[in-house]
Image: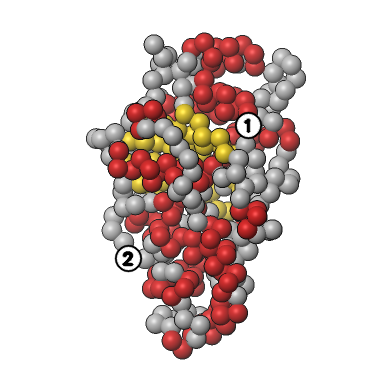
Amino acid sequence: MGEVGKLMVGGLVLPSSVTGPAGRRHLPSHEGRRSPQPRIAGMQLHLLDATYELFRAFFGAPERSAPDGREVGAVAGLIASTLSLLREPGVTHLAAATDQVIESFRNEMFAGYKTGEGVPEVLMQQFPLAERALEAMGVTVWAMTRFEADDALATGAWKYADDVERVVILSPDKDFAQCVIRRKVVTYDRRQEIERDEDGVWEKFGVAPSSIPDYLGLVGDTADGIPGLHGWGAKSTATVLAHYRTIEEIPDDAERWSVNVRSAARLAQTLAENRDDALLFRDLAVLRRDVPLDQSIADLEWHGVARGPYLELCRELDFDQLAERPQTWQE
């Protein structure tokens, strides 16, 4: 994600700040703008990375116990954050994705891929409650087991893009940069208040959105347990992929490269000797578009908080103040 001051737990990285963009010719974009989401005339679909939101709440919100002794601080933080999102103009259609388990089909592809090791059990125990809370708030929830939450959100962005004016993926995760399409599908970091469209992806990473998996295959992604290739840093990778676009198109011999890169001969040799690994790492970084999502775009329209289930949850968890916070209830 290009962040500094990161916190890693079980292979998941929580960002604390975002570095500046990499250089590249570009048109004016929203990259680096720190402001609430802009008003858009047409209908938008917002896709929430609820796994990230729950992790962020767990490490950022105070601990809190339910009357039965369960730790529910992260759930409280997620509820407060989601209700705030639902009050924003333009948030009319919303779905959230969660990881019921950290492991996925990618662990079968590569033994070093991220696992749940090191993730606090008290955090994992809050995921079922978090999903229940989101549903009580009237939000469609895609709870993932074999796939990852990222795959569900990527599938949703692809599946519903033609049904709306714009899709906004609410996550700071750099994996989602591959989903960006012009200004039609964008990412938005709620904490940093940074929106990134296609030009913004070029500014940040120096490559096209379609090259992001190749970029991560070469550079690696510590958050996901993807090692990348030794010596292939962000700058050299961006320079090479900005020209060649995919790993397959990069020649084995640096003498045949059409770009000037420091230590090109060494990088070319590393790639030639480890091309299969690079392709595997690229495949690990590719977000799926085939997660079974049965809803129509109409099903994702938010009609308000479900009064009965929501108030019952608040009573159960002793969330008295949160019980009074919804402004729109379902009829």
As drawn, 279 above or below 262: above
Residue at x-position 56% and y-position 58%:
284
How far is mark 2 from mark 1, CA to CA? Answer: 42 Å
Q: Can residue 197 be seen here?
A: yes
- The amino acid type found where label 1 is placed reads Phe
**Residue 101: x %, y % from top left:** 65, 40
Residue occupying the far bottom of the picture: 255
Label 2 packing within 10 angstroms: few (<14), some (14-19), many (20+): few
Q: Quadrant of the C terminus?
A: top left
At mark 1, the secondary structure is helix
Residue 25's disc number: 2
Q: Nearer the viewer, residue 179 or 19?
A: 179
Residue 127 badge: 1
Q: Earlier in the sequence, mark 2 or mark 1?
A: 2
Q: Nearer the viewer, residue 35 or 251?
A: 251
Position of residue 69 in the picture relative to residue 51 (left or right): right
Name the residue at 63% across, 63% down.
227
Q: Are marks 2 and 1 in contact (CB under 8 Å)?
A: no
Q: Residue at x 72, y 22 (%)?
A: 70
Q: Amino acid at mark 2?
A: Arg
